[in-house]
Amino acid sequence: MSEKVAIVTGAGRGIGRAIALRLMADGYTVLGCGRNVRGPELPDAAHWVQASVAEPMGASRILAAAQALGRVTLLVNNAGVQVEKSTLDSTDEDWDLVIGANCRGVFNMCRAVLPDMERSGGVIVNIGSISATAADPSMALYNASKAFVHGLTRSIAVDHGPNVRCNAIAPGWIMTEMADDAFALAKNPQAARADALARHPVGRMGTPEDIANMVSWLASDQAAYVSGASFTVDGGMTAASPLNPGLF
């Protein structure tokens, strides 16, 4: 039985996979989960359960599988979906999909782990987005859902300390399939990518490993005095003015 079990939702690919790999390197026993069957990108050393976080019973199944491995000390809520539509174009089905995964799913998983964490201690890291405070076009439900994630993060930190620390990460442009889908909305996707890159003071887009590194720190004792905070990890993009620095 492990003394350091981490649950990583949406661990099958992208940011979730990078988080799972980093936590395994940090000595955690990792349980990944997702709506689909285990993908080939996740190593055999990581455990897996197929379940939907949007369903309370799914969250219960995930927690039970993790507890069978040992003491759950870390939850990383990474699972999320996006629908590329405005408010007017979004349907009830779109609402159920995005709010189900991005809001209800985070809530369900936090509620599931909190009883044990309040008694024995634990850390929750929620993956939000810079879209929570600066809306991307034609991403109405996604933008709103990420604002919920940051708000819930603060509430959990306030209501469930001192044994539980809860923080959020707000990634910027991280090169994953979701980012590709967002750029595809542009009239000229190639030009949109070039413009986005020019707005990054660090000179590059983000990688899933950049977010995994932040999760690792927030889960560590080095962050013992950090709770209720949201950390922007975007290469400096949102620190700049709207002027494109590539034109100056």
Image (tube, helix red, strand yellow):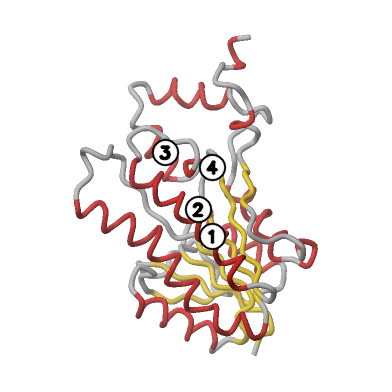
Q: Earlier in the sequence, mark 2 or mark 3?
A: 2
Where residue 21 appears, as percent x and y from the top left, is 61, 63
The residue labelled by disc 1 is 17
Q: Residues within 10 Å of mark 1 (few under 14, many from 20)?
A: many
Quadrant containing the N terminus in the rendered view: bottom right
Task: Quote the CA–CA distance across marks 4 and 3.
Answer: 10 Å
Q: Residues within 10 Å of mark 2 (few under 14, many from 20)?
A: some
Q: Earlier in the sequence, mark 2 or mark 4?
A: 2
Task: Quote the CA–CA distance across marks 1 and 4.
Answer: 13 Å
Left or right side of 205 for 136: left
Residue 174 numbered tag: 4
Task: Quote the CA–CA distance across marks 1 and 2.
Answer: 5 Å
The residue labelled by disc 2 is 14
Q: Amino acid at mark 2?
A: Gly
Question: Marks 2 and 3: CB-CB under 8 Å?
Answer: no
Question: Marks 2 and 4: CB-CB under 8 Å?
Answer: yes
Quadrant containing the C terminus in the rendered view: top right
Considering every residue shown, the one lying at the far top of the view is 248
Task: Quote the CA–CA distance across marks 2 and 3.
Answer: 12 Å
Left or right side of 151 for 181: left
Comparing marks 2 and 4, which lies closer to the viewer? 4
Q: Amino acid at mark 1?
A: Arg
